[in-house]
Image: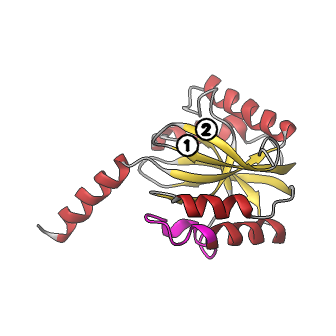
Amino acid sequence: MPEFLHRTVRARYLAKIMVQSVELLLDDTADAEIRRQWQLLAEAGVHSPAADHRPHVTLGVARQIWPRIEHSLGALEFRPVPVRLGGLLVFGARNPILVRLVVPTEALLALHQRVFAVLAPCPGVPANVRPDAWTPHITLARRLKPHQVGEAVHAVAADRDFPATFVGIRRWDGDQRRDWPIAGPDDGR
């Protein structure tokens, strides 16, 4: 099989595999603000996350997270992390994604590094979640057509940076379409 075809087949195969992730959760005020921005985007006719989706920042992703890794994630020390939610960014070109940048702080980067160190042995950890490549963000709109980028930015561009606090960590299982707390409120500790 030619190399380019092999890469295409592999990419399609991997796209069908559901994601396992570790995610940071926002305080109630910041959560409500992101949901307000999703509503503005929906009113502008731009695809934004569903109402049952929870605003979050993905700390790490893997194709599979083994039970021993899950246990190690639960043992990580976690304290709320204050941050600023900053400007808008666009990821990708063919199917752009509009995101709000999370201004990195030392505490956030240190937490990400600890989580990555635990997840690193798992299969299917993409390069863009490595500590030297990670861009903390909250997704505002995905699956945009290139001609929709301007409309999407315009819908939320008037919003300014605002403070937020990450109050917990959850695990998301894309295969089972469920989540559960690891640290912070409702973590069962």
Residue at the spot x=35%, y=46% of the render? 16
Residue at the (69%, 72%) spot, across then down: 113
> Callout 2, which amino acid?
Ala
Question: Image quadrant for the N terminus?
Answer: bottom left
Q: Is residue 82 above or below residue 18?
A: below
Residue 149, quarter of picture: top right
Helix, strand or loop for disc 1 = helix
**Observer able to see residue 159:** yes
Residue 64 position in % (x across, y down) = 46, 57
Query: In the drawing, does residue 137 fall left or right of residue 130?
Result: right
Q: What is the crowding at mark 2: few (fewer than 14 residues within 10 Å), some, or many (at least 20)?
A: many
Give residue 149's mark: 1
Q: Position of residue 25 (x, y in %)?
A: 75, 46
Q: Is residue 86 magenta?
A: no
Q: Which residues are magenta?
A: 118-133
Q: Is residue 162 visible?
A: no
**Answer yes or no: do the residues labelled 2 and 1 have beta carbons within 8 Å?**
yes
**Looking at the rendering, which quadrant does residue 158 occupy?**
top right
Indicate the position of residue 51 as horizontal and vertical percent values.
Answer: 64, 26
